[in-house]
Amino acid sequence: MDSAELKKVALNDVHVSLGGKMVPFAGYNMPVRYSSDLDEHHTVRNAVGVFDVSHMGEFMVEGPGALPLIQNVTSNDASKLVNGQAQYSCLPNDKGGIVDDLLVYKMADEKYLLVVNASNIDKDWNWISSHNSFGAKMTNISDATSLFAVQGPKAVEVLQKITSVDLSAIGYYHFTLGEMGGIKDIIISATGYTGAGGFELYVKNEDAKKLWDKVFEAGASAGIKPIGLGARDTLRLEMGFCLYGNDIDDTTSPIEAGLGWITKFTKEFTNSAAIKAQKEAGISKKLVGFELVDRGIPRAHYELFNSSEEKIGEVTSGSQSPTLGIGIGMGYVNKAYSQPDTEIFVGIRGKFLKAKVVKVPFLKK
């Protein structure tokens, strides 16, 4: 895709003016970094940073058919949501894999917001629409919506300066609709993909620049910085969070991916009988976290081996952990090698580097 075809987020020119290195990502022109991945990673872990993740997709699903549709296409049980609560879930396909992972927000009775990955907006829309035999009203608001993830231990104190909403009263995976920076009807959501705490702010494109400026003004004394996709990846990896297209995709089942906790068989959903049967029969491969014992950096698609140098799996995500200072990764391995403390080896340029399977998150609170 040439740069002329890339979609741009509302604040594209702001990121360019801030020195953001722009790269194609999921069909969008996105900032991968502003200073260095390491500096930006530590900013979020220790202070506060802001990600522009406006490339994500947002669908409103409304009406009496909204909950039945969501229950039909998602693996988690959305009937358990109360107004003002969000839920992590996935869209199983009919072949045992995953169409996408997503967030389900209960805005009100018969009104939900689905937040999906940028690379899957059209695919998810078509998939959910094709299952909408419930007459739910669906609206794709992706192109009109900006999303900022204000993440880090100082996020609450920074954002509290520009809102009268009591941010400390919003529980994890809960949200409220409120005024911030003089802008009404912002979804203030205690979610994020960094494990560092903070909020995600959904705002209309026309108010995005004003909100961005207000947040940075409020955060100046806390050392606030814009953060790119590079640090977003190492932050989520340290938490052992799956990235669609790497750790989960159309061929990986929720059970293999360790997402049994968002797969509720108290209801029927797409392919639920087959996934339940798989859970009961047992899986042959499993997504695990591992830490390198030897020095080295694992990368996606590197092969994993046992001590006899037999291939037992493949890395799906890997990096040097900026916080821990060691190589960490996730990958699918034969189930026999999935227990914590199991010794495995990563094949890196003809060498077998020793690693051990660990429970995620890599970063223990």
Image (cartoon, rainbow, N blue to C red):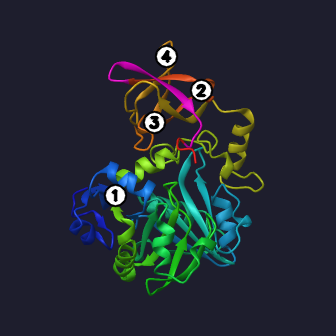
Q: Amino acid at mark 4?
A: Glu
Task: Tell me where residue 150 appears, x and y as whole percent.
Answer: 45, 66
In the rendered structure, find residue 328 and report the number of the disc placed on it.
Answer: 3
User: Image height check: is 198 above or below 213?
Assistant: above
Residue furthest out toward the right: 266
Q: In the rendered image of this protein, does residue 95 appear above or below residue 143?
A: above
* Residue 228 tag number: 1
Give the residue number, with chain letter if any, for mark 4: 310
How far separated are the C-alphas under marks 3 and 4? 21 Å
- Quarter holding residue 35: bottom left
Give the side of residue 30 with respect to residue 69, left or right.
Answer: left
Q: Earlier in the sequence, mark 1 or mark 4?
A: 1
Q: Residue 72: x percent and y percent? A: 67, 61
Q: Amino acid at mark 1?
A: Gly
Q: Which residues are magenta?
A: 348-361
Residue in the image at 50% along x and 12% along y: 308
Residue ID for mark 2: 341
